[in-house]
Amino acid sequence: MALDLSATLLTSSNEVPMSRLSPTILSLGLLATALVAQSPAPKAIDPANLDTSVKPCDDFYHYANGGWLKRATIPADKARFGSFEELADRNRDTLHAILEETSKRTDWKQGSIEQKVGDFYASGMDTAAIEKLGAAPLKPWLSRIEAMKGPKDLAPVLAAFHTARAGGGGFGLFVSQDAKNSTQYIVQLGQGGLGLPDRDYYLKDDVKSKELRAKYVTHVARMMVLAGENPQDAGAHADAVMALETRLAKASMTRVEQRNPQATYHKMKVPGLAQLAPQFDWTAYFKGRGIKRLEDVNVRQPDFFKEFGLLAEQITLPEWQAYLRWHAVSSSAPYLSKAFVDEAFDFNSRTLNGIPQQQDRWKRVQAALDTPSALGEAAGQLYVKKAFSPDAKKKMIVLIENLRAALKGKIEALPWMGDDTKKQALKKLAAFGVKVGYPDKWKDASKIEIKRGDFFGNLMRARAYESMHNIEKLGRPIDRTEWGMTPSTVNAYYSPTMNEIVFPAGILQPPF
């Protein structure tokens, strides 16, 4: 665990950290703090954080942060703590108050965002109902796995699990912009299927890594027992899971290799994919995902899919069933009864990340809701009503356009830049998109059925909706209104394929 004072922003693979952007753009966050209609927050620059006993010319880091370092402690439910986490905690409290207030009412209009958000949160906080169900929510998925008769069933079962985002393992499929033709969407196929965080966890030969793998096998077995297996079978199945995942890990790219965008771009026709991994029934898989017409795919890691094809043929049916059961249980565990939740926390947080204490229940339920999704944006609508006014958004946009105009004037006045180069630079500047605060067009959550007392079912229906919504992008124009973060997120990102910078309301507060 570590204290973190950096301003590093965590981003998805399709996003560029804000630290790579120009100082002019980064200054927007600081300038915007006066415009945000938030509850009282700490000062952007707090003198108490300084250590004036240190000369800034000798050690500016400790001069600027020494006071904070002396008094700060890492909360027991976190692996790191810094300015991002402090602000995220304040934002979490704001959203928590909204969810508590909304969930107390049961007379919201059916289908309204208040009903959906309130009932989702209430269902997650209904621990009595969740405990009563135990492992029962897993039964439909485990029965589907048990009904497999042979290798031909692997593709449709994986498709069903991937569509519901109910585990499944193997690999990942999602639809996003084509990196070399950002005017259209393309199916992306990527490596996956590991229960440990990274390939190196399976392949390193040091003592610590070996001990961790042994603990992982024990964890898998314990989870299988909770799901209804006897201890002897669970132990054998855990060994089978480790063996299969190790083969997937060996075929996986390293994190360093994946940083090269050229290395993960391998566009091919569907018949080319079938030649790459002929042992897997791609036609059945795509049909199960609801993809009716498909010509091109980007196979991000071809060597991985070659190996996956071999595994589809070489791994026995019982071994595949053990693997699929594990991934179904693992992905569902945080949302099941306390025994599952505690076992998942013990390994994933305590063992892997050194976090000694589990987060409060409300924080975990809130995290399940506050995701880049239709339901997450429904909660986001309630958040911005309280925390970020339309007037603040308008003022931020005016501020940004003033900065753009100032930069335009500087480019036009550059004596060393030729006219053709200036023309291209100004064209790029004009095309640069900016999103501030919250979406102008909210995602539609009206088709997601949310019921009180059905936390797991609510999650599955919401996930299935997001999965199908993603697939439905194929063949459609690029949706330039879509956001990759919720309004309350304490983060920001640049999207190269959209050529836009995005500032959620959550980060437009001190100290940013």
Image (cartoon, rainbow, N blue to C red):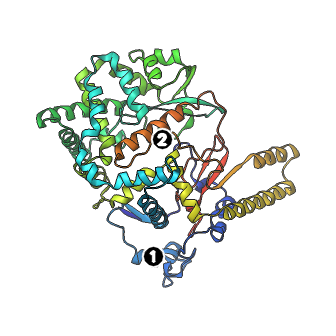
Expressed as whole percent of the image width and height from the top left, the position of residue 465 reads 48, 37
Residue 125, compared with residue 511, is above or below; it is above
Expressed as whole percent of the image width and height from the top left, the position of residue 121 reads 40, 54
Relative placement, left or right, of 158 versus 44 is left
Which amino acid, by three-letter code, is at mark 2? Answer: Ile
Q: Which of the image's four quarters has the N terminus?
A: bottom left
Judged from the image, the secondary structure of the residue bearing numbered disc 1 is helix
Which amino acid, by three-letter code, is at mark 1? Answer: Trp
Expressed as whole percent of the image width and height from the top left, the position of residue 308 reads 38, 24
Task: Determine if residue 420 is in view.
Answer: yes
**Is the Cβ of the residue at disc 2 closer than 8 Å to that at disc 1?**
no
Residue topped by disc 2: 448
Q: Which of the image's four quarters has the C terminus?
A: bottom right
Q: Which image quadrant is residue 25 in? A: bottom right
- Which of discs 2 and 1 lies nearer the camera? The answer is 2
The residue under the point 59% across, 55% down is: 18
Residue 348, compared with residue 52, is above or below; it is above
The circle drawn on residue 68 is 1
The residue under the point 67% across, 64% down is: 392
* Mark earlier in primary sequence (2, 1): 1
* Number of numbered discs overlaid on the protein picture: 2
Question: For the residues marked 2 and 1, what is the alpha-carbon distance in whole angstroms?
Answer: 44 Å
